[in-house]
């Protein structure tokens, strides 16, 4: 069964959902981080780490570099690894030709890498071959580009198997509960979802109908 990572930068929702215990990791990116962290991204990320440290089991935490310059990517990755000091930190590096060299170098230094923003099975295969431990497929954006989302996840999983690497596939850019189900049925290792989608996953009109019927037929337990 696929694990669920929370796609978020909000301290409030991370804290709330961690306490429920239904997620297996947290991931963020600069677009989510900016409105929450303002001009002090490191301080905000440290706050997230503090929340994660309260969990009995250390959950993976994916943090993306915030530059397109290869050398600065390396510098930022090493800085985040040092400053956050979190054993399960995973550095997100975007998919790209120059970025492959960055991934290769960081993996050689012992850092865990998530190659993110992949759209095609070919990108997934290459990202896997350079040692990425995690690979993020953007399912919604892939569909926007004309990819068949119903078969894409399985094709990407096959690409990982054929590369003979043990990378785990993370499927993100999920816009509906149906997208989540498509990713799970495709055999992905991990889905990453926003809190709004996570809450929709637990909701269904027929469930609500049943609960309302139970409430209507409530029998007092004591006279």
Image (cartoon, rainbow, N blue to C red):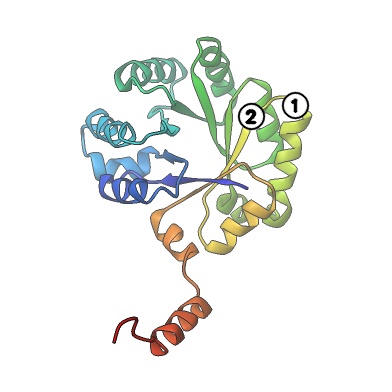
* Mark 2 secondary-structure assignment: loop
Q: Is residue 162 above or below residue 195?
A: above
Going by the image, does 173 lie left or right of 26?
Answer: right
Q: Where is residue 135? Give x, y as percent.
A: 59, 34
Mark in the foreground, 2 or 1: 2
Q: Residue furthest front?
A: 223
Is residue 16 or residue 103 the one in the foreground?
A: 16
**Which residue is denoted by mark 1 in the rendering?**
163
Q: Quadrant of residue 108?
A: top right
**Which residue is denoted by mark 2 in the rendering?**
167
Is residue 104 or residue 18 the one in the foreground?
A: 18
Going by the image, does 157 lie left or right of 8?
Answer: right
Q: Where is residue 217? Give x, y as percent.
A: 42, 89
Callout 2 crowding tier (Cα within 10 Å): few <14, some 14–19, many ≥20: many
* Mark 1 secondary-structure assignment: loop
Is residue 94 or residue 208 the one in the foreground?
A: 208
- The quarter of the picture where the C terminus appears is bottom left
Q: Where is residue 93? Give x, y as percent.
A: 49, 28
């Amino acid at each position: 069964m696929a694990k669920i990572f929370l796609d978020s930068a909000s301290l409030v929702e991370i804290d709330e959902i961690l306490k429920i215990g239904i997620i297996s990791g947290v991931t963020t990116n600069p677009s989510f981080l900016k409105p929450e962290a303002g001009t002090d991204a490191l301080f905000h990320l440290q706050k997230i780490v503090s929340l994660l440290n309260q969990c009995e089991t250390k959950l993976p935490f994916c943090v993306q570099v915030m530059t397109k310059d290869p050398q600065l990517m390396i510098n930022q990755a090493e800085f985040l690894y040092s400053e956050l000091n979190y054993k399960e930190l995973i550095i997100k590096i975007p998919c790209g030709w120059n970025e492959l060299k960055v991934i290769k170098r960081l993996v050689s230094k012992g850092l865990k890498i998530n190659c993110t923003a992949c759209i095609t099975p070919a990108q997934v295969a290459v990202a896997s071959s350079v040692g990425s431990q995690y690979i993020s497929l953007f399912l919604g954006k892939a569909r926007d580009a004309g990819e068949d989302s119903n078969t894409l996840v399985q094709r990407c999983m096959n690409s990982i198997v054929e590369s003979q690497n043990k990378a785990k596939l993370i499927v993100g850019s999920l816009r509906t509960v149906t997208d989540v189900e498509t990713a799970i049925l495709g055999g992905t290792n991990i889905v990453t979802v926003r809190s709004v989608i996570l809450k929709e996953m637990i909701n269904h009109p027929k469930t609500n109908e049943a609960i309302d019927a139970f409430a209507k037929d409530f029998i007092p337990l004591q006279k």
